Image: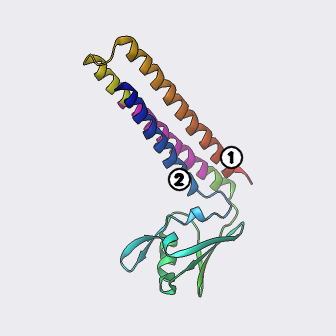
Amino acid sequence: MSGEVLAGTERKMVRAIEAMERDFTGIRTGRASTSLVERIHVDYYGTQTPLNQLAGISVPESHLIVIQPWDRAVLGAIEKAIQKSDIGLVPNVDGTVVRLNIPPLTEERRKDIVRVVHKRMEEARVEVRNLRREAADSLRREERDGELGADEAHREHDALQKLTDRYVGEVDKLGAHKEQEVLEV
């Protein structure tokens, strides 16, 4: 049973890391990327629809995102959704496409983005530690119920701590990479 606890905890930790990575893709780094706008939801005839399901998104230049909707009637809704989003870009509607110019980031804005990255890293660390606590409680319960011997429980707790340390290290590594990417001029 305790092996199942560790395996389940590891799967949850992997999902926590993947969620953090997904959040990092939406953080602006000064270069144009389709991931900045893909997750923006547009009011499409009363339904909140992700932008990547309504339009083709391309990056023809390093500082330009072009959004070409498949239905021209949705241009205004796309413009409003981008303005409401927190990406901080002003859409330029050009008849059939929406252009987003990505200005170079100022040093102050870079520092703000790094703070956001650090906040998201800490959230991921807390999530991993909470998963460790839940697994440790489960192991203690098994030990108390007699399903697990004291020596085996100690080994499982050590394995759980090593697993936690590995995933916290992964959070730190990915966060440092994103921070370096943001600070790169």
Q: Is residue 72 above or below residue 60?
A: below
Label placed on residue 97: none
Instruction: Tell how many labels.
Output: 2
What is the x, y in percent for residue 157? Answer: 42, 21
User: Label 1 sits on what residue type?
Assistant: Gln
Among the two numbered marks 2 and 1 on one chain, the one whose residue lies closer to the N terminus? 2
- Residue 108: which quarter of the image? bottom right
What is the x, y in percent for residue 103? Answer: 68, 66
Q: Element under label 1?
A: helix
- Residue 10: which quarter of the image? top left
Q: Element under label 2?
A: helix
Q: In the image, which residues are magenta? A: 113-134
Residue that appears at 63% across and 47% down: 178
Q: Is residue 43 magenta?
A: no
Disc 2 designates what residue? 22
Is 109 positioned to the left or the right of 19 in the image? Answer: right
Is 182 positioned to the left or the right of 54 in the image? Answer: right
